[in-house]
Image (cartoon, grey):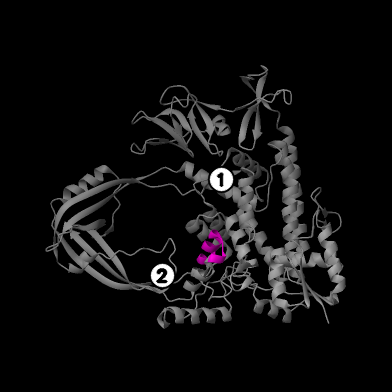
């Protein structure tokens, strides 16, 4: 009887797929890649057509030996690695490492690990798609070139162990740019006003928000302006000018892609991108479900397509019809315009079986596995349901020349909201008081409540918002978002506090070097264009060697220029006047995982270290002692008094020597301006350039 061998990537899939295929099939795992570029060198033959020099990955010898034994026993070999470029490349590397005869090898791929999907893939076996392989090879070589040519420069300039990366360095720049934007932000004052109005026959007052006047919306920007408006309003009579009723519908969400899953899991479940991908991998590869055995319960997790197979779409609509009723089924499927980089061979992330509800599998899954599965299941079901319909009421109230607005909505038909409501889905408020209002209804003023506000700076990036930014800019691919963020955190270029990502001193230094020496590498448009070229390689319209050979000479020239510049820079340790407590030598400034610190130059005989408190030449506004640059435990920069904890002064912005001429308080640097630290004062002045201060920052 014929014997067939199926090679998969992950050992977790072996048991599941073996169960589907029966005794004529042997299933074995490669444990991911088996060949790669060597770690000890660039691994690319620059003199002979940019040929990669692949070697067997250390520790994979025994796996390959076992696979060779299985290959000898098999009549046919099916390569069933993941359905993406990386998976295609692993299959190709296996053919080389195992010396497989092309006549007896077949490439199969499936979007979900179910019996039907696996058996169907065997009937649709094909050859290896070299376009996909070449796209992966080009990406790997570009990443290697950037990492291996630039990282040594960072070691020489800052410290060993740092790294640069083609996507990583752009992501770092994006975070740095946002930090600069936040630091330079100057808040602007504005006021809101709410009127409490009595309705005839009603006990509860109506709350109406100030809108403007008969010509349109007005923004009140100061207390003086507000006082003028209040004076006029106190003398006016209030009456309803217009009551508008209508209907509004909200479309259901699209099913998850890798990016949107990572974003939503971060927002609603507080999962890191890395955790989301780890859990999704487990759900895809197979979990032991009571009464069903080991089965993959979601489709492939690395995708930027929102496409759904016709079979899955029909099954979902049938499920919704039976579980919720015919009127809940969407009239037509949601569509999204392609953005030029959709990997449409994949589907969106969805449950492999719509009838496998979260309640059915809850006892078989870990807590976090269940929460992620429920999120994916709910989102997919919602994507096949009808729109939510709201009844809206909008009331315009006149007070002389001024206008107030009140609006409310109530749900007429829940639609998809009966299954899934994201953070952005509003919770409608049904203001019953509006029912008693008609045009020309006279209202009585009971009170006016004014509030002062200040505009807020752009938000710090979170993992979710960074993923969204990378996707919108066309940087990276579904498989790269989580590793990129993990690397930035691991290298301590950024730190995470309360979900927010903050740049560290080390991150600022690395970004500064990259901007100066390699502006192209950290340019988001250049990186997005490179991703587009790799897509064209995958489509077979661009030669991968052309992409690599056009990229490397410019990189090499930039590296050589940077090396010459670095030779001019004195990178010796900076000696301070701080004496070592143990041996008396003057301590020197070093770079560590958290940035600068003081170390004894007598290492290894003397291992004494101290925090480095860098004075910025400004007196503490509270006690008159020196203000120093400090870092939080995680490495985020701030400015505090050297006499802490006795003096509690601290500021996220760099304080200035200048005093505010209006209120006498201290000023802070905001980009190229100086602003009073007290937003109530609001004084702003241009800042003279201070090279010393910029270097210290």
Does any portion of residue 600 appear in the rendered image?
yes
Mark 1 or mark 2: whose residue is earlier in sequence: 1
Q: Is residue 619 left or right of residue 694?
A: left
Seen in the picture, residue 386 relative to 535 is either above or below; the reply is below
Residue 423 screen position, x and y as percent:
43, 60
Seen in the picture, residue 451 relative to 652 is either above or below; the reply is below
Task: Say which residue appears at 62% left-offset and 32% top-offset.
Answer: 596
Circle 2 Cα neighbour tier, 10 Å, few/some/many (<14 / 14–19 / ≥20): many
Residue 346 screen position, x and y as percent:
63, 72
Q: Is residue 100 left or right of residue 354?
A: right
Magenta stretch in the rendered image: 363-375
Quarter of the image where the N terminus is located: bottom right
Any magenta on residue 369? yes
Does any portion of residue 554 appear in the rendered image?
no
Residue that lies at the very extreme toward the top in this rendered image: 584
Secondary structure found at label 2: helix
Q: Are marks 1 and 2 in contact (CB under 8 Å)?
A: no
Q: CA distance from mark 1 to mark 2?
A: 38 Å
Helix, strand or loop for the magenta stretch, by majority: helix
Task: Say which residue appears at 73% left-offset and 37% top-offset.
Answer: 156
Q: Nearer the viewer, mark 1 or mark 2?
A: 2
Location of mark 1 (residue): 176
Residue 261 screen position, x and y as percent:
54, 63
Any magenta on residue 222? no
Specify the label residue 417 is tagged with: 2
Seen in the picture, residue 273 relative to 182 is either above or below; the reply is below
Return the residue nearer the eye: 635 or 377: 377
């Amino acid at each position: 009887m014929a014997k067939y061998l199926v090679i998969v990537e992950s050992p977790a899939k072996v048991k599941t797929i073996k169960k589907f295929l029966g005794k004529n099939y042997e299933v074995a795992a490669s444990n991911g890649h088996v060949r790669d570029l060597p770690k000890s060198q660039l691994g690319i033959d620059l003199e002979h057509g940019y040929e990669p020099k692949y070697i067997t990955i250390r520790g994979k010898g025994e796996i390959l030996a076992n696979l060779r034994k299985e290959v000898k026993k098999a009549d046919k070999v099916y390569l069933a690695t993941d359905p993406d470029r990386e998976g295609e490349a692993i299959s190709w590397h296996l053919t080389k490492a195992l010396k497989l005869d092309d006549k007896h090898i077949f490439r199969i791929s499936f979007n979900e690990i179910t019996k039907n999907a696996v058996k169907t893939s065997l009937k649709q076996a094909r050859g290896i798609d070299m376009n996909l392989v070449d796209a992966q090879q080009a990406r790997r070589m570009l990443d290697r070139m950037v990492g291996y040519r630039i990282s040594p420069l960072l070691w020489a300039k800052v410290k060993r162990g740092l790294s640069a990366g083609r996507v990583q360095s752009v992501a770092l720049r994006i975070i740095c740019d946002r930090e600069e934007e936040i630091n330079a932000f100057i808040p602007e004052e504005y006021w809101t006003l709410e009127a409490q109005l009595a309705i005839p026959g009603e006990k509860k007052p109506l709350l109406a928000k100030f809108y403007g006047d008969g010509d349109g919306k007005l923004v009140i920007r100061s207390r003086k302006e507000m006082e003028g408006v209040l004076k006029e309003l106190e003398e006016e009579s209030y009456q309803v000018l217009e009551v508008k009723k209508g209907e509004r519908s909200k479309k259901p969400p699209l099913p998850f892609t890798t990016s949107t899953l990572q974003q939503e899991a971060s927002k609603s479940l507080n999962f890191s991108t890395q955790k989301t991908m780890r859990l999704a991998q487990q759900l895809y590869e197979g979990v032991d479900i009571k009464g069903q055995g080991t089965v993959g319960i979601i489709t492939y997790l690395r995708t930027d397509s929102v496409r759904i197979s016709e079979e899955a779409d029909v099954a979902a609509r049938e499920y919704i019809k039976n579980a919720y009723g015919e009127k809940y089924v969407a009239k037509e499927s949601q569509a999204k315009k392609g953005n030029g980089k959709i990997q449409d061979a994949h589907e969106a992330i969805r449950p492999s079986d719509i009838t496998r509800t979260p309640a059915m599998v809850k006892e078989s899954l870990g807590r976090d596995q269940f929460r992620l599965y429920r999120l994916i299941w709910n989102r997919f079901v919602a994507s096949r349901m009808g729109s939510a319909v709201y009844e809206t009421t909008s009331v315009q109230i006149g007070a002389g020349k001024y206008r107030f607005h009140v609006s409310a909505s109530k749900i007429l038909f829940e639609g998809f909201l009966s299954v899934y409501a994201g953070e952005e889905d509003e919770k409608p408020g049904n203001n019953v008081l509006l029912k008693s209002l008609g045009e020309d209804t006279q209202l009585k003023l009971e009170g006016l409540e004014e509030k002062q506000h200040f505009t807020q700076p752009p938000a710090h990036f979170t993992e979710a918002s960074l993923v969204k930014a990378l996707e919108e800019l066309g940087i990276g691919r579904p498989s790269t978002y989580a590793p990129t963020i993990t690397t930035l955190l691991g290298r301590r270029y950024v730190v995470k506090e309360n979900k927010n990502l903050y740049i560290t001193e080390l991150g600022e230094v690395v970004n500064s070097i990259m901007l100066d020496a390699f502006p192209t590498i950290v340019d988001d448009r250049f990186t997005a264009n490179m991703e587009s070229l790799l897509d064209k390689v995958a489509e077979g319209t661009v030669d991968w060697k052309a992409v690599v050979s056009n990229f490397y000479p410019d990189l090499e020239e930039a590296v050589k220029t940077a090396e010459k510049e670095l030779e001019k820079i004195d990178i010796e340790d900076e000696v301070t006047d701080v004496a070592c407590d143990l041996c008396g030598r003057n301590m020197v400034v070093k770079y560590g995982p958290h940035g600068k610190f003081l170390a004894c130059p007598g290492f290894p005989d003397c291992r004494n270290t101290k925090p480095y408190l860098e004075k910025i030449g400004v007196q503490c506004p509270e006690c008159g002692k020196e203000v120093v640059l400090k870092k939080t435990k995680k490495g985020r920069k701030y400015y505090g008094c050297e006499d802490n904890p006795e003096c509690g002064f601290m500021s996220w912005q760099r304080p200035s020597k200048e005093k505010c001429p209006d209120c006498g308080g201290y000023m802070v640097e905001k980009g190229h301006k100086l602003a009073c630290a007290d937003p109530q004062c609001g004084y702003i002045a241009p800042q003279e350039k201070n090279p010393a201060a910029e270097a210290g920052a």
